[in-house]
Amino acid sequence: MKQLLQEIRNCTLCASELPFGARPIISTHPNNRLVIVSQAPGSVVHQNGVAWQDQGGNTLRRWLDLSEDEFYDAEKVGIVPMGFCYPGKGKSGDLPPRKECAPLWHPPVFEQLQKIKLILLVGRYAQQYYLKEQAEKTLTATVKNYQQYLHTFFPLPHPSPRNRFWRQKNPWFEETVVPVLQQHIKSILA
């Protein structure tokens, strides 16, 4: 795993397409029981080099009911984005994750993760990639029907501050889904 992570962190495959260059962000370990698959690092994470060390990460840790120490315990929690580098800014937020990363790097990473109990699919890109035709037509419907994916996946909205309107429109998520999510996390990491 160490060699694979070094290869990923040295990857420059699409560097010429990235406005701020390549800085692949990943955190994983063969003992991971919980893996977070999200879209791509944002500009703050690109600068600080620590996955989810931003406002969205604060919200995600609250949803998971994990302290920073628990969240960043690489032996327990893996962080494997769909795109490992910050893709740049678009009209309504960050650009989509680069399409090269997941097909190239996810298979060898997940081959080495044999102890996974649950994969959190954070945001639509991760859900469409991993759930394929089983994903509902919308993120809201996919998240609402999270039970049908359990035992392997748990779909979540993206916790970015930009997504606050979705959370305001869908209070059921934090009222009913987050407590179930926290129970799963506690039992997996116990």
Image: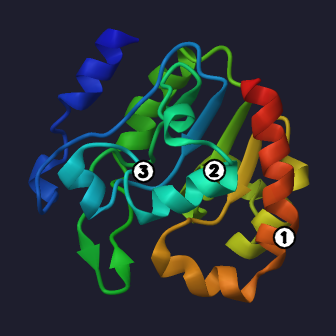
- Residue placed most toward the observer, 116 or 71: 71
Q: Residues under labels 1 and 2: Cα distance? A: 19 Å
Going 59% across and 21% down the picture, which residue do you hit? 32
Q: At which x and y percent is residue 112? A: 53, 14
* Quadrant showing the C terminus: top right
Q: Quadrant of residue 11?
A: top left
Which comes before the other along the chain, label 1 or label 2?
Answer: 2
Which comes before the other along the chain, label 1 or label 3?
Answer: 3
Q: At which x and y percent is residue 117? A: 75, 27
Q: Quadrant of residue 123?
A: bottom right
Q: At which x and y percent is residue 52? A: 42, 50
In this rendering, is residue 125 above or below 115?
below
Going 18% across and 53% down the picture, which residue do you hit? 47
Give the structural element (helix, strand or loop) at label 1.
Answer: helix
Q: Is residue 71 visible?
A: yes
Residue on which the image places disc 3: 52
Residue on which the image places disc 2: 121
Q: Residues under labels 1 and 3: Cα distance? A: 23 Å
Q: Is residue 132 visible?
A: no
Say left or right for 187 vs 26. Answer: right
Q: Name the kind of residue labelled 2 in the image.
A: Leu
Q: Name the kind of residue labelled 1 in the image.
A: Glu
Give the structural element (helix, strand or loop) at label 2.
Answer: strand
In this rendering, is residue 128 above or below 50?
below
Q: Name the kind of residue labelled 3 in the image.
A: Trp
- Callouts 1 and 2 close, C-beta under 8 Å: no
Q: Quadrant of residue 93?
A: bottom left
| Mark 1 or 2: the one toward you | 1
Going 82% across and 39% down the picture, which residue do you hit? 184
Going 50% across and 33% down the picture, which residue do you hit? 69
Mark identifier at residue 175:
1
| Mark 3 or 2: the one toward you | 3
